[in-house]
Image (spheres, rainbow, N blue to C red):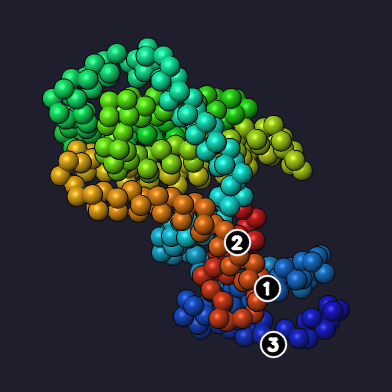
Amino acid sequence: MREAQFLKQNAEKWKQYERDLHTQKDPDTFADRFIELTDDLSYSKTFYKSSNTTKYLNGLTAQFHQKIYKNKKEKASRILQFWQFELPYLFRQYHRQLLYSFLFFTAFCLVGALSAKYDENFIRMILGDNYVNMTNENIEKGDPFAVYKHAGQLTMFFGIAFNNIRVAFLAFVSGITFSIGTVMLLIQNGLMMGSFEYYFFSKGLGVQSLLAIFIHGTLELSAIVIAGCAGLIMGSSLLFPQTFGRWESILKGGRDGMKIVLGLVPFFLMAAFLESFVTRYYKQIPLWLNLGILGLSLWLIIGYFIWYPILLHRRLAKTLDHNNDPSQDQNLKLWLNRKLTSGK
């Protein structure tokens, strides 16, 4: 389409939008106008890059952007959109790194269990003499998981939450060592988990340990694997910059990995809450509730970090294919257009 025809076709609409800037109060209408203008601006940038039409649309779109986002409500909306769209959209790009992180962790869980089976000193080397001796005493007393009762609930909550978040950030930052530090951390945690579980299975407490520890461990261990994924993202940005310059690739990998680690904070808080306030009552919790907590935790991790990102990408593709269809998710379109115009 020639620029003159493009102007003729849209001039009246744009003039109306200019008037709406001063007369329109409905935020949904502003959002619709902004989406249409970004579509027109994108088209104009493609075919009439340096023209006055593009400059005019860029200015008009900027005014609508300021009208929509100038108030403080945008902060709450921005946080909601981070969880609803930004994090899962981002995470879909890194499912391969998630798989690698999971495989590293799982493989060394098995190595830890086998090592503990064939070397009785391995458990003490990994878990420490104090922990093993204390747990042996607790088993003799008939309360093998009394360790989860050793501190006040609130003190325990803050201590566990802080430690788990610290480990997650360490897993991410260690990616700067070309992922070697991240892999070593996954290996360490995998060996600990494998030897830990073998220890309880060797005492005839395997099923009981799974039911008790995985009340909180499902979220906690899954979040560590995802933090490992963030570290592998950092490492791969160093090793494989692809079409980016190496520094640009590092910045992108660092930014994306940091978003993922920050996104894990609520999951670590939930895990700390369960460990501090629920796990200590594992004997009193009925089996159906125990299994319900385990299943819900697993569903939350798989649903949010694996299944929902896939669905979101499909929704985005459908939204782009039906860009002028009012039945499409307007919140999703608004977020997508803002993402495309900001370039982030």
Q: Residues within 10 Å of mark 3 (few under 14, many from 20)?
A: few
Residue 37: image quadrant is bottom right
At 27% from the left and 18% from the top, the residue drawn is 132
Marking on residue 27: none
Residue 70 screen position, x and y as percent: 48, 64
At 43% from the left and 41% from the top, the residue drawn is 222
| Quadrant including the N terminus | bottom right
Amino acid tagged 1: Asp
Tell me the SS state at disc 3: helix
Residue placed under numbered mark 3 in the picture = 12
User: Is 27 drawn above or below residue 296 in the view shown?
Assistant: below
Alpha carbons under labels 2 and 3: distance apart:
35 Å
At 46% from the left and 52% from the top, the residue drawn is 302
Amino acid tagged 3: Glu
User: Which is more toward the observer, 37 or 215?
Assistant: 215
> Looking at this rendering, what residue extends furthest in the left direction?
141
Residue 333 screen position, x and y as percent: 58, 70
Alpha carbons under labels 3 and 1: distance apart:
26 Å
On the question of residue 243 being in view, the answer is yes
Residue 334: image quadrant is bottom right
Marking on residue 321: 1
Alpha carbons under labels 2 and 1: distance apart:
12 Å
Which is more N-terminal, label 3 or label 2? 3
